[in-house]
């Protein structure tokens, strides 16, 4: 079977279970061994079982788990892309405030957040309000006040942002309110 772990990974898992660590599973995908912790719980209201799974990392042959790596280069590239996209919208920035909120951030990214926030401050000095969020998936969102005028409304600007987001392969962008 394709997802069956190799023998050394099975031995590692057996050792972990002997040490009392329950709920761990190892799955082979694309030549790497992924370690997950899983548990189930009974939902008495819906009368069915639910499974929760948490990604732990990639298991190496020496028995260490390598947690998810942060791709700094990808984040920097994406931030530059977002800055370029927002600057291209500057043609339509006029009066009437419309607030954009780009959500979907994950905890544990403080250093990357500070780095990208400084970058956005340098690149977007004229913005009255600016918040940059970087997700664990390496995506970056800029939230700030956009002033639209009679030339283009907020929905039209959103369509431009959406088209650009799809072009770069973004999938976590959520607009909360316009």
Image: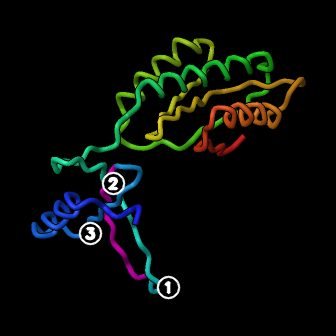
Q: Is residue 37 above or below residue 73?
A: below
Span of residues in magenta: 32-42
Q: As drawn, which residue projects farthest toward the right?
A: 150
Number of other residues with Cα within 10 Å of mark 3, as a class: few under 14, some 14 to 19, many 20 or more:
few
Local packing at callout 1 (Cα closer than 10 Å; few below 14, some 14-19, many 20+) is few
Q: Position of residue 110 (x, y in %)?
A: 36, 32
> Which quadrant of the structure image shows residue 27?
bottom left
Q: Mark 3 points at which residue?
A: 23
What residue is rendered at 64% in x and 18% in y?
84
Quarter holding residue 160: top right
Query: Does label 1 or label 3 sit earlier along the sequence?
Result: 3
Residue 35 part of the magenta-drawn span: yes
Q: Which SS class for mark 1?
A: loop
How many marks overall? 3
> Which quarter of the rendered picture does the N terminus lie within?
bottom left
Residue 102 vs 127, above or below: the answer is below
Which mark identifies residue 45?
1
**Tag 3 near tag 2, CB within 8 Å:** no
In the picture, measured across the screen, residue 156 lies left or right of residue 25, that is right
Task: Measure the alpha-carbon separation of dots 3 and 2.
Answer: 14 Å
| Residue 34: mark | 2
Q: Distance between the residues labelled 1 and 3?
A: 25 Å
């Amino acid at each position: 079977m394709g997802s069956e772990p190799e023998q050394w990974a099975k031995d590692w898992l057996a050792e972990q279970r002997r040490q009392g660590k329950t709920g761990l599973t190892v799955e082979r995908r694309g030549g790497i061994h992924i370690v997950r912790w899983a548990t189930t719980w009974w939902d008495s209201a819906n009368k069915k079982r639910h499974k929760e799974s948490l990604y732990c990392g990639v298991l190496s042959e020496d028995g260490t788990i390598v947690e998810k790596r942060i791709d700094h280069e990808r984040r920097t590239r994406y931030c530059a892309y977002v800055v370029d996209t927002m600057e291209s919208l500057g043609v339509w920035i006029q009066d009437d405030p419309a607030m954009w909120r780009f959500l979907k951030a994950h905890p544990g990214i403080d250093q990357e957040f500070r780095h990208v926030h400084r970058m956005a401050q340098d690149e977007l000095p004229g913005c009255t309000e600016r918040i940059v969020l970087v997700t664990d998936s390496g995506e970056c969102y800029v939230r700030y006040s956009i002033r639209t005028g009679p030339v283009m409304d907020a929905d039209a600007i959103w369509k431009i942002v959406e088209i650009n987001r799809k072009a770069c392969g973004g999938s976590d962008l959520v607009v909360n309110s316009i």
